[in-house]
Amino acid sequence: MTALSARDRYPTRGELVLVLNCGSSSIKFALFDSGQVPLPRTPVWNGKVQGIGGPTPTYGETGIAPEPLAALDPQQPYHAALRRIEQGVLARLGGRRLHSIAHRVVHGGSRYFAPVRVDAAVLADLHALIPLAPLHQPFALEAIRVLLAQRPDLPQVACFDTAFHHTLPRVEQLLPLPFDAWQRGLRRYGFHGLSYEYLALALHERHGDHARGRVIAAHLGSGASLCAMQDLRSVATTMGFSALDGLMMGTRTGALDPGAVLYLMEIEKLSLAQVGRVLYSESGLLGVSGTSSEPRVLLPLEQEDSDAGARARDALALYVRRIVREIGALVAVLGGLDLLVFTAGVGEHSAEIRQRVCDGLAFLGVRLDPRRNADDALVISAADSAVVVGVEPTNEEWIAARDALALDDVPAQDGPGHGQ
């Protein structure tokens, strides 16, 4: 990369907002142009680095075939991935400047429930929350740390997945533990908040006041959760203290009898680290099927008359059952259901999973239009359905960019600043 000074590399307070969504082995990136008002929901440039830390990492921009990244530093692969993204940003500045870099940060704990400009003190606070979201939190914070060191004057803005659920009533936040656990911050937080925040906006635009009624949003991706909304606000959700709770996911257990964890540790003598790997990385669809964490891989496999086919059938049956069961619980909390919406990778693109879930909700009067469902239409319910069912593409990156712009000229926080 051309040797440029830090200031030349990232001139500050300009029109473009870079959004980074960092996971354990990938970084999604998007660049938004705030010179247009309102902020366009489509980025001017976006893509993804995948396979970080693995043998075959790739860098891909939307609309262009991914390229191999064979030169990632094995000692610091995340830093090398950030440098490749930086090259892409520099190629697209075109004389414009960066306003800020917005980061999806999964956990804000009990102290942060609004976007915040990150400084060393905020970074230290967020670092303490890594055990609550080990698949995402450390990697987002590592990106922030690296970029803060490069350009301390360029705002790094943390946008929290827990923030949207700050409206949960107290009874939904409480955990059935001794009260001093609550005082130490053990409570239901909820996640996928950037996705749900976008849906609250998009659903009202599409469905009008109907979206202010009793709504359940199903964010079904590699991570998965449900959010019950009333008046476009979160009133209940399936993920809790950590991103392990609730629905069965790609590699995560979802809700699990804590006695099973005690058994693994006491009887099978698994260490804390081993149990963590089981719960976060070796369970869910991958664990039950033994084949894949992705429904699109398991759906054709379940047709086979083999052990692998039987395990795929078990995995998908349990996956759908958990979704239906949790939707039923949230319908009870809401006192009924007016609108059900699917989003994220599986929710937006798997007509078969949507059909199976809605078949399980037939008792509510849910009916799908098979053709519209097959086409991933924005409304997939039949005309005689008692519940409107939709598919709404999420846009977490746009929410993060919008929130970063809203902090314009706000100084870095000396402490929590946005807490309870």
Image (cartoon, rainbow, N blue to C red):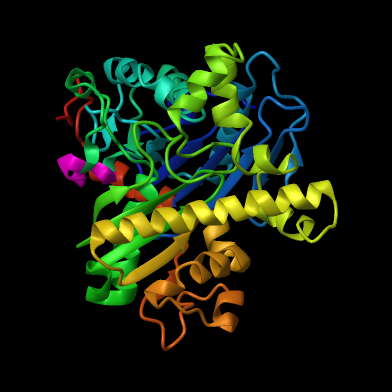
Q: Position of residue 300 (x, y in %)?
A: 77, 60
Residue 282: quarter of image: top right
Q: Nearer the viewer, residue 219 or 416?
A: 219
Q: Is residue 216 above or below residue 257?
A: below
75 part of magenta stretch: no
Q: Is residue 369 visible?
A: yes
Q: Is the residue 249 above or below the residue 33 in the image?
A: above
- 297 on left or right of 99: right
* Principal secondary structure, stretch drawn in magenta: helix
Q: Is residue 408 visible?
A: no
Q: Is residue 393 left or right of residue 355?
A: left
Position of residue 212 measured from the top left corner of the image (x, y, whole percent): 22, 68
Q: Quadrant of the N terminus?
A: top right
Q: Nearer the viewer, residue 135 or 289?
A: 289
Residue depicted at x 61% and y 55%: 317
Spot occupied by residue 420 in the image (x, y as percentages of width and height): 14, 30
Image height check: is 350 above or below 396?
below
Relative placement, left or right, of 132 versus 56 is left
Q: Position of residue 330 (x, y in %)?
A: 32, 56
Per the rendered image, the range of residues in magenta is 164-171
Q: Residue at x 28, y 49 (%)?
A: 236
